[in-house]
Amino acid sequence: MIFEVGESVTFTVTDDEDEDITSQSTILVDGTAITGSTFSPSNPGNYEIKATYKSVTSNKIFITVDPPVTLSSIDITSSEPAIFIGSSVTFSARAIYSDNSSIDITSDSEFYVDDIPISGNEYTGNEEGAINVKAEYESITSSLLQVQVVDSSNLPASFSKKGVIEDFTGTWCGWCPRVSHAASLVEAQTDRVFIVGIHNGDQMANSFGSQMEAEYNITGFPTAYIDRSSTWNYPEPNNISQAIAAGEGNANVGLAIQSTLTGSILQMTISTGFLENISDARLVVFILEDGIISDQENYTSYYGGGSVISNFEHNGVLRYAATNILGDATTSILGIHEQSFNTDLNSYGVQQPSNTGILAMLVDQSGRVLLNAQYASVNQTQNFD
C-alpha cells in the first residue's frame, strides 16, 4: 500500500473467526504502539505494521509513504515562436508536480508580457522586437519565454520556387552525356532550376561528392535527383518537364546571396527569409565551378555521337560544401536571418575561382526535401525574388 505524507490510514484487526477486535488490540508501527487504529505518517519511508491481542501477535503488513506531491514549476509555451506585427500568439501553461505529473493550468494562470499583465492568454504584436513572456500560478512564476515580433515589410509577399538537379556523373561514364544533354534542355527553358555535377572517379571527384553518393546510395551512373527527393525519370531528355516543374510556383521560404572574391578567398553571406515558422529547417551551401574542360566518354547519340567528346565543358561541378551536405541547423522562424562563410578556394581544387558560384538551399530536417534554393556567381548579389 502506498500513501503520502499527511494522509491517514486506518487499520482493522480481526480474529480467526473474522470478528472485529480492533478496539481491543494494540497496533504497532515499526514496533511502537500507536493510539487507536489510525496512523498519520509525518515522514516518508517504509513502515512495518502489526497488532497484538492478548498474547497473540498478528501477521505483518507493510506500507510505503511517499513525500507529498507539491507544485515544482510552471512550463509556459507559445503557439508560435515568432509572429508578424499585427498578428496574435497564444500562450499555454502547465503545472509540473514533484511526482512528474502535470496538468494544464492555462485558464488559471496570469500571463505577463515584458512584466505587464495581459488579459487572458493571447497577445497581439505591435512593434518589432523580442517580447519576454511569463506565467504565474499559486505564487510560482515560470521561466521567461521569448517570442519574436517581426516587421513583414522587409519581406516579399512570397518567394519564387527554385529547383535543383543533383547529377551523379563522371568523365568515364559513357551514358552520362544523356543527363548532361537533358540538363542543357532544362537550362534553355528556365533559369529557376540549378544543376549540380557530382563527379565520381575523375579529376573533379572529391570527398563532398563521395559523401553525397553514400547518402543517396548511388549504385549506377548516371543518376540524377530532382529537389533531393525524386529521381529524374529515364530517359531524362524526354522528361525535362519533370525538372522544369521543380522551378515553378511560389514558396514561403527564400534565399539571397552576397559574396566577395579576393584572389582565391571567398567571403559569402547567405540570407534566409521565412514567411512562416518552420520546424528544424537546414541550410546547405555548395560552391560550384563552371568551365572545366575535360574529355568525356560517350555511348549516346548526343554531342555528335562520337565515343569521346573532346574538350567537353563541365559546368556546375561541386567543389566545396561550406555546410554538411544534408545541411546545418539554421534559424527558421519568421523574418530574415544571415549566416556568413569564408573559404580559400585553392584548397579545394578550384581551377578558376572567378568561374565559381554559390548554390544555397533550404531543406527539411532530413536534408532530403528541398524547400527552396538560390544561386549567384561570385562577386554578384542575388536578392530575394
Image (cartoon, rainbow, N blue to C red):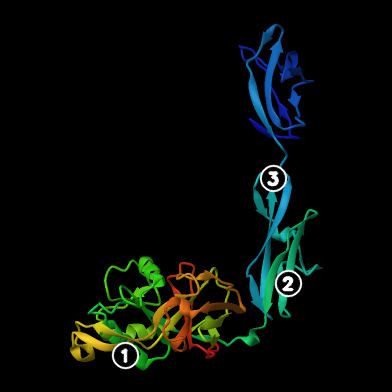
* Badge 2 or badge 3: first in the primary sequence: 3
Q: CA distance from mark 1 to mark 2?
A: 51 Å
Specify the amino acid type for callout 2: Ile
Residue with the mark numbered 2: 131
x, y percentage for residue 314?
34, 85
The Cα–Cα distance between marks 2 and 3, rounded to whole angstroms, is 30 Å
Residue 36 image offset from top left, x and y in percent: 77, 21
The picture places residue 161, in percent across and down from the top left corner, at: 46, 84
What residue is shown with label 3?
98
Secondary element under disc 2, as helix, strand or loop, is strand
Vertical comparison of 384 with 9: above or below:
below
Can you tell which of label 1 and label 2 is closer to the viewer? 1
Residue at 71 percent of width and 20 percent of height = 30
Q: Is residue 75 left or right of residue 262?
A: right
* 1 or 3: tag closer to the N-terminus: 3
Tell me the kind of residue under disc 1: Leu
Residue placed under numbered mark 1 in the picture: 185
Q: Choose top left, top right, bottom left or bottom right for residue 207.
A: bottom left
Q: Earlier in the sequence, mark 1 or mark 2?
A: 2
Q: Residue at x 76, y 17 (%)?
A: 33
Q: Is residue 161 in view from this perspective?
A: no
Viewer-proximal residue, 176 or 347?
347
Q: Quick one: label 3, few (<14), some, or many (20+) residues within 10 Å?
A: few
Q: Classify mark 1: residues with Cα within 10 Å, few (<14), some (14-19) or many (20+).
A: some
